[in-house]
Amino acid sequence: MRALFFRDLALALRAGGGFGLGLAFFLIVVVLVPFSVGPASDLLARIAPGVLWLGALLACLLSLDRLLAVDWEDGALDLLATSPLPLEGVVAVKAGAHWVTTGLPLVLAAPVLGVLLNLAPGGYGVLVVSLVLGTPALSMIGAFGAALTVGIKRGGLLMSLLVLPLYVPTLIFGAEAARRGAEGLDPATPLLFLAGITLAVLALMPFAAGAVLRVNLR
Amino acid sequence: MRALFFRDLALALRAGGGFGLGLAFFLIVVVLVPFSVGPASDLLARIAPGVLWLGALLACLLSLDRLLAVDWEDGALDLLATSPLPLEGVVAVKAGAHWVTTGLPLVLAAPVLGVLLNLAPGGYGVLVVSLVLGTPALSMIGAFGAALTVGIKRGGLLMSLLVLPLYVPTLIFGAEAARRGAEGLDPATPLLFLAGITLAVLALMPFAAGAVLRVNLR
Amino acid sequence: MSLWEYANPVKFLGLSERILPWLWGLSAACLAIGLIWGFFFTPDDFRQGSTVKIIYLHVPAALMAINAWFMMLVASLIWIIRRHHVSALAARAAAPVGIVMTLIALFTGAIWGQPMWGTWWAWDPRLTSFLILFLFYLGYVALWEAIEDPDTAADLTSILCLVGTVFAVLSRYAVNFWNQGLHQGASLSLDKEENVADVFYQPLLFCIAGFVLLFFALVLYRTGTEIRVRRTRALMARENAVA
Amino acid sequence: MELNVTDLAVGRSGVPVLAGVSFTLSAGRALVLRGPNGAGKTTLLRTVAGLQEPMEGAVVGAEDQVAYAAHADGLKSALTVAENLQFWAAVFGQSGIAEALHAFDLEGLENRAAGTLSAGQKRRLGLARLVVTGRPLWILDEPTVSLDAASVALFADAVRAHLAGGGCALMATHIDLGIEADVLDVTPYRARAGAVAASDEAFL
Amino acid sequence: MELNVTDLAVGRSGVPVLAGVSFTLSAGRALVLRGPNGAGKTTLLRTVAGLQEPMEGAVVGAEDQVAYAAHADGLKSALTVAENLQFWAAVFGQSGIAEALHAFDLEGLENRAAGTLSAGQKRRLGLARLVVTGRPLWILDEPTVSLDAASVALFADAVRAHLAGGGCALMATHIDLGIEADVLDVTPYRARAGAVAASDEAFL
Ligand code: HEM
Ligand SMILES: Nc1ncnc2c1ncn2[C@@H]1O[C@H](COP(=O)(O)OP(=O)(O)OP(=O)(O)O)[C@@H](O)[C@H]1O
Ligand SMILES: Nc1ncnc2c1ncn2[C@@H]1O[C@H](COP(=O)(O)OP(=O)(O)OP(=O)(O)O)[C@@H](O)[C@H]1O
Ligand SMILES: [Mg+2]
Ligand SMILES: [Mg+2]
């Protein structure tokens, strides 16, 4: 398991890996928003928490695309399936590595990008907290989606279609908390819901993903 | 050339292809926006043209990801390079097939999704016109990005990074036109600029993309 | 003789061929009675005018859209636990019907919303959850279409259906939390006081019954088609193996 | 270590390919599957390795004993040769890759990224992976593809050493490796339609 | 149709692999490249096919004459066998795939999706593609990988027919095909460091 984790980290850090790319995508989406909705700063401030959450979500989703597909194509997944590691563990570890290489940088970058969108001064803390609580669920749900679509060429888009509806509760609570933070309201309730969802997802989703992967390898 | 075009269409229509999926992604992004920025309908109406343009752009981008990568991985691109077709033509035809399977459905779906975002009644016509003028450029620029990153595993995200800045002018003029339409102003100027950009891109980009592809195959 | 006997595709086909004409007939009759009664023999509402009559399409379609998903959930569970091909195919057959019902509800709702709320669409929790349900349907169908091996596809889609159900319910609560709405509450409760007026109510029941029967007829019919597709496949495979 | 396959039927997407296959493989022995293209060797090997379900019959003694090498090698082109091997060693709870590098003459290449190897070098690396798994049952699908004569000899030596150490090997190959092994021709087991209660048969 | 290679040096990512290779291949002749794994056969073939630039020397007579078959077959798994072939026929401006199907015994498989073929069947389809290109110079990189003995014979027949029709073939292989052909062992041409003015040498 540890070996797999570090291998995934190493692969992400080497050329062509995803480290930093998710971040850059996040940056660009956030930068494109003023171009598309216009530069009025009050408008931007109002939509800032939502845009940051949505941007983080899309960046996460995009980098999930090839989480398992690469290993499938070069046969490594078959080999892992005949190894002593349980497939549930494989998926969970891969989702963990994905979070470290994508989710974590997104969390750290979000406040900086908040400045670009005129995020209200009080909103930064809550934004970061909500992202820290929410992004692990995004990675894990995404790993389930990746496991579902692993055998399909050009599965990336299908994966988005399957995964995005599953992201809805996380997004709603996360963005709501960030918005309340920015407006100076109390964000405790949505944050609690968010934490609950993440915990449940982390506890149960690896089993669903493992089962799906086993079917796909068959 | 025709054979290539129809093969790409056939592949997109078969199981696992991208037809319809780009559309679904567009729908989902548009649905996620209110979840993240909140349901206030005046706010949504204000950002609607921008969100629709950004959503169409992202949907287009995501489906571009594997435009050339699939052919590269299974060796078909090497074979096409030794065939009588010029690589410029190959890229242009593939971009064309991509537009038919992705851009065109997006254009047709945009007005329907406009309803979801309370787009102002006057804005629909201009929105569609601006998308018709703009999306071919998105496909062609994206094909250039795909050619740049074709040899890279997990190149999808890197491609987004390279392509998104190139999309900025198209996005600015397209979204500006749609916004003016929605606000009842005259959208002629941005539409003209948009048409100009698209024509220039269609005329010149295939050569850049072909050159890049040739380098990558070496 | 247990019910599971009809899990055999051939028996199932036989049974459905016997039931189907009745189902078609009954649903047509119920729909005809309900719609004609509702459209022509009920008074206009004093506030809504004649637009109220959309209720005869809107409510049954909305009900069936949700129940179709529920049926798919049950069928998926049966497939996972007992691995009866018919139930997997029935789930597959129900999905497009569910999508159509969802679309009918969405469109009739939008048409109704225009005079009532002055807008085609609002991000009301009820409507929003419905849109999310629509997305789940889309994903489910897309996954079926994308996978070639039918048993693999059945396994994957049924797990997706289970996980999707959990998340759909979660989304429903999340959406409620996120926005309070304009839409009607449940007006078909047993508590008579809260019901829509009787004049509207009775034809509505006929319409609902008609939609339920129509749904079952469509699902049975489509399941039969799916079974025949699989049979053709099996025959072709046998031919290839002999060749 | 003994592998028992009894009355096995295997198929692809519900279509039976082979039926009624039985054999026993005991420690120190190798079994070579033969048969023309499309006979079903790959399908049989995947079933024995546990990557797909048998349609009928049983495979006993393979669980957690298998090291599988297929057409694809599962190499990461961004990692070096040594890193690739170390990863698989760690996954299988082993350590030490020196022996494997030596057995397949990869010693000069340790620090080369796997993506820059030639076809035959990649294949050698894929086979070296078998050694580091420490698993007793090797299941090999056309292991000598792209190998030159010298490398085929290295491979034969590695298999012999594995057998001498109490392991066993099941492989499909079209060429003669010079290893003393039993041969099983799968052609006679080709499934006739209807011979197996395939999942699709329920629809007939 | 004549291919002239003079004093060719080829390399991978700036590192020279082979240097000083010269040969001539005229209509009706076949040339087999030999050499151990990693010798540089693939690199040489890719250079002759025009897929990479020579580091030194020249390849004359190959342009627009080449049909190249590499390790990867360029098949689309979602398309059927016939559709795959028809596509390549159309790209090369040819029509009629019946002959190619026949030459590689694919006639029963026309309507199968290419993704469901076995390894050897895929390979046969990849080779059938050569026939539909109508190109005179076949460049083949380990063409017989995964093929059984019968299919290798089919392939040898196809090459012979191609040569008899005035074509020529350049191939790298580790096994003996039974085709009458000249043999070129590339081992002696292995590039010594500094032998070639490689692009990186400018930095020394
Ligand atoms: C696009 C817009 C709309 C959608 C998606 C929609 C969706 C739904 C759904 C999902 C139900 C629930 C069925 C149930 O839970 O039992 C429903 C019921 C109902 N809708 Fe709508 N609706 C829309 C617009 C409207 C409008 C504009 C009105 C009228 C003002 C309306 C009136 C009703 C009524 C009276 C019911 C019956 C409530 C019940 O008995 O549960 N709907 N609709
Ligand atoms: N990107 C690279 N950087 C450095 N060396 C490389 C690179 N790619 C290949 N090589 C080396 O170049 C040499 C020639 O490789 P090539 O693929 O041409 O060999 P080959 O003769 O085809 O071998 P095989 O019989 O194994 O297919 C090999 O030693 C290989 O390791
Ligand atoms: N998805 C599928 N649907 C139907 N038939 C299939 C499918 N996949 C494979 N087959 C067929 O099953 C048979 C067995 O294939 P398998 O890959 O096991 O052959 P093999 O003996 O390994 O051949 P090779 O020597 O060419 O590798 C082949 O005839 C193949 O065409
Ligand atoms: Mg095989
Ligand atoms: Mg080679």
Image: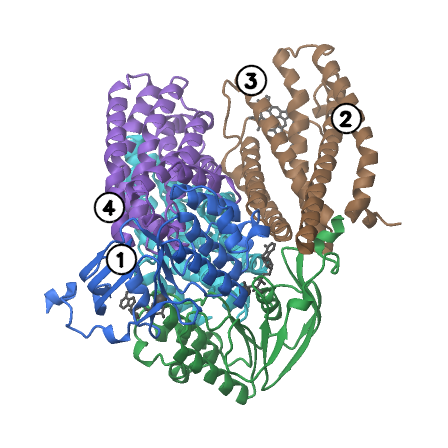
Chain colours: A cyan, B purple, C brown, D green, E blue
Q: Is B84 rendered above or below residue E142?
A: above
Chain letter of the residue carrying label 2: C
Residue D165 visible in rendering: no
What residue does disc 2 label?
Answer: C27
Please report contact status of discs 4 and 1: CB closer than 8 Å, yes or no.
no
Residue placed at 75% from the left, 32% from the top? C217
Task: Give the mark toward the camera: 4 or 1.
Answer: 1
Q: Is residue C204 left or right of residue D46?
A: right
Q: Few, some or many C-alpha atoms within 10 Å of disc 2 (few <14, some 14-19, many ≥20)?
A: many
What residue does disc 3 label?
Answer: C116
Residue placed at 54% from the left, 70% from the top? A82
Instruction: Please name the amino acid that badge 1 sits on.
Output: Leu
Q: Few, some or many C-alpha atoms within 10 Å of disc 3 (few <14, some 14-19, many ≥20)?
A: some
Mark 3 Cβ inside 8 Å of ligand 1: yes
Please report contact status of discs 4 and 2: CB closer than 8 Å, yes or no.
no
Tell me the SS state at disc 2: helix
**Quadrant for the C terminus of chain A in the image:** bottom right
What residue does disc 4 label?
Answer: B211
Instruction: Please name the amino acid that badge 3 sits on.
Output: Met
